[in-house]
Image (spheres, rainbow, N blue to C red):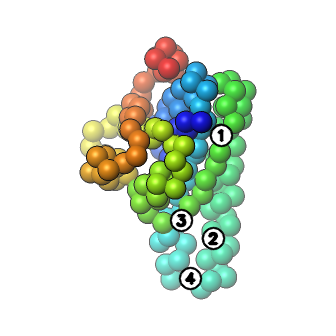
Amino acid sequence: MRKFLVLLDDSRECLNAMRFAAMRAASTGGGVVILSVIPADDIQHGFGFGVADVMRAEAQERIEAHFEVFAKWMRTRPKVEPELVIREGDPAEELIAQIAEDPEIGVVVLGLDSDKSGQNPVLTRLLREAATLACPITIVPGDIPKERLEAIT
């Protein structure tokens, strides 16, 4: 089964990437993998192992709660059962590692902020390595209306 890989973060444009991936998966008989990365610096910097474990557990709880919001919509509307993967490290590196480890990933879907002043380090890294990735990248504008997304998926 071909899977659409989406990076879950706190950005507004992430919502459109999730919608696009779920609708494409539903229309093509594919699946959705939602990757969330806990930055290693957020967990380990200056803390002992006990505190780091608590911070990691709290981060995972937040991610799972965030995931459930998207998963509930995916299960009811496009009728797709998403898979959650939580990794720790640099988001771009972990995204590339997930692609390498899961041969069923067929497309990476990223949302793009309409604010031209902002930088997207994950997208920048993926574009630098696009020729060596095992799948294409789909970039979904963050401000595209959901009706337009439905029309093109």
Mark 3 or mark 1: name the one nearer the start of the chain. 1
Q: Residues within 10 Å of mark 1 (few under 14, many from 20)?
A: many
- Is there CB contact under 8 Å for labels 4 and 2? yes
Q: Is residue 123 left or right of residue 36?
A: left
- Residue type, label 1: Pro
Mark 4 or mark 2: name the one nearer the start of the chain. 4
* The one of 78 and 56 positioned closer to us in this rendering: 78
Mark 4 or mark 1: name the one nearer the start of the chain. 4
Looking at the image, can residue 91 be seen? no
- Residue type, label 2: Met
Q: Is residue 76 left or right of residue 15?
A: right
Q: Residues within 10 Å of mark 4 (few under 14, many from 20)?
A: few
- Residue 46 percent coordinates (x, y): 51, 83
Mark 3 or mark 2: name the one nearer the start of the chain. 2
Query: If the image is split into quadrants, where does the N terminus sit?
Result: top right
- What's the residue at 54%, 65% (across, down)? 88
Q: Secondary structure at mark 2?
A: helix
Report the Cα–Cα distance between label 4 and label 1: 33 Å
- Residue type, label 3: Glu
Identify the mark at residue 47; answer none if there is no mark.
Answer: 4
Report the Cα–Cα distance between label 4 and label 3: 16 Å
Q: Secondary structure at mark 3?
A: strand
**Residue highlighted by disc 1:** 82
Identify the mark at residue 55; answer none if there is no mark.
Answer: 2
* The one of 66 and 98 positioned closer to us in this rendering: 98
Identify the mark at residue 88; answer none if there is no mark.
Answer: 3
